[in-house]
Image: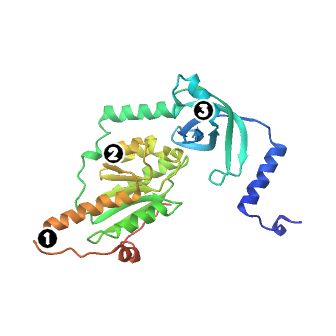
């Protein structure tokens, strides 16, 4: 029977079949070395994170493998380190079985043993060196010293080339903007080895398009997905931009180098739009005669509105 003639499988069935193949033909234990990122210990005392490999250029993460650590091993690792948790960003070696079937992480490494090779990985050392260079050169707060207009007439927008959630959230909230606003958009990679250079190029291009502010936004994801914003190309592009940059990348606890170099950094694309909308609304209120009401638009009305008038020029 040709593969095309086989009946289609559901996702769960396909994952089960992959699991059977790995169990039958793969090794009983896999040993994987990598940089641990996004390490968290849940309420059930299980540890989770990603084992990552940096790109050949050192900018960002090229690949990642989710890893799960059972409670007993988490306790053992803490005991070895004097009661401290595994340091996020450390280089580790993990041995365990490859598990298939978890609905959120279809393939993950379930650890049976682990050891810290180096408490500080090259990824962390590179980040610290970049921070020191930006601090010494005075570039760390250069963009923050620029003046963000109270009312923006022409906006540069950098969004992810894949995934619509963050972009949609931003444009929906920008629908509350009280005046006409043109949006010049660049859609580009926001994660993976090509992302740092792609983000840098998008910011540089928008800075030459006569925009008054630039917003870089994307939805949330794993901590390893944010590595592009810790890399030199993206962070320095923001630092040298002659236009104020607002960063709205979906994260709540991690602070990237790009967060520190941006004029304004907020936790979500929606919050990035709020920065612009709130400033414009406040300016409009202060300039209106006393007793004049600002027209109110309900949430339902905003959702039914088309996105703001935009001239979108996509990079090739």
Q: Where is residue 30 in the image (x, y as percent from the top left)?
A: 73, 36
Work out how far the residue at label 3 is from the one at label 1, CA to CA, in angstroms: 60 Å
Q: Position of residue 75 (x, y in %)?
A: 59, 30
Q: Can residue 209 be seen in this view?
A: no
Horizontal side of residue 292 vs 21, given as left or right: left
How crowded pointer 3 is (Cα within 10 Å; few <14, some 14-19, many 20+) is rated as: many
Q: Which of marks 1 and 2 is nearer the N terminus?
A: 2
For mark 1, what is the residue?
288
For mark 3, what is the residue?
74
Q: Which of 115 and 308 is in front in this view?
A: 115
Q: Can residue 114 be seen in this view?
A: yes
Instruction: Kindly report which numbered mark, 3 or 1, lies closer to the viewer in this rendering.
Output: 3
How crowded pointer 1 is (Cα within 10 Å; few <14, some 14-19, many 20+) is rated as: few
Q: Residue at x 83, y 66 (%)?
A: 6
* Secondary-structure class at tag 1: loop
Q: Which residue is drawn at 45% across and 59% down?
A: 159
Q: Where is residue 165 in the image (x, y as percent from the top left)?
A: 48, 62
Instruction: Kindly report which numbered mark, 1 or 2, lies closer to the viewer in this rendering.
Output: 1
Q: Which of marks 3 and 1 is nearer the N terminus?
A: 3
Q: Which of marks 2 and 3 is nearer the N terminus?
A: 3
CB contact under 8 Å: marks 3 and 1: no
* Secondary-structure class at tag 2: helix
Work out how far the residue at label 1 is from the one at label 2, CA to CA, in angstroms: 36 Å
Find residue 310 and report its image quarter: bottom left
Find residue 313 and report its image quarter: bottom left
Q: Where is residue 98 in the image (x, y as percent from the top left)?
A: 72, 42
Quarter of the picture containing the N terminus is bottom right
Outermost residue toward the front?
Answer: 44
Q: Nearer the viewer, residue 91 or 57?
A: 91
């Amino acid at each position: 029977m040709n593969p095309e003639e086989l009946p289609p499988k559901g996702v769960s069935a396909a994952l089960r079949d992959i699991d059977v193949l790995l169990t039958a033909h793969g090794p009983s234990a896999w040993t994987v070395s990598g940089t641990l990122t996004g390490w968290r210990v849940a309420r059930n005392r299980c540890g989770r994170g990603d084992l990552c490999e940096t790109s050949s250029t050192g900018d960002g993460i090229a690949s990642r493998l989710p890893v799960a650590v059972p409670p007993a091993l988490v306790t053992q690792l803490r005991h070895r380190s004097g009661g401290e948790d595994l340091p996020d960003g450390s280089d580790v070696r993990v041995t365990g079985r490859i598990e298939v079937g978890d609905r959120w992480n279809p393939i993950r490494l379930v650890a049976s043993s682990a050891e810290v090779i180096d408490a500080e990985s090259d990824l962390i050392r590179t980040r610290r060196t970049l921070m020191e260079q930006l601090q010494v050169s005075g570039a760390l707060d250069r963009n923050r010293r620029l003046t963000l207009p109270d009312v923006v007439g022409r906006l540069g927008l950098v969004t992810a080339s894949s995934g619509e959630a963050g972009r949609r959230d931003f444009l929906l909230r920008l629908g509350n903007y009280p005046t006409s606003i043109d949006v010049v958009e660049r859609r580009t990679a926001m994660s993976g080895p090509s992302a740092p250079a792609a983000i840098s190029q998008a910011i540089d291009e928008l800075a030459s398009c006569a925009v008054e502010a630039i917003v870089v936004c994307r939805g949330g994801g794993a901590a390893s997905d944010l590595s592009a914003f810790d890399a030199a190309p993206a962070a320095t592009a923001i630092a040298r931009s002659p236009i104020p940059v607002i960063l709205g990348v979906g994260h709540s606890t991690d602070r990237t180098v790009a967060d520190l170099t941006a004029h304004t950094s907020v936790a979500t694309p929606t919050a990035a739009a709020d920065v612009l909308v709130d400033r414009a609304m406040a300016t409009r209120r202060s300039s209106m005669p006393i007793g004049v009401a600002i027209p109110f638009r309900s949430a339902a009305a905003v959702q039914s509105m088309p996105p703001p008038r935009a001239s979108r020029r996509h990079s090739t």
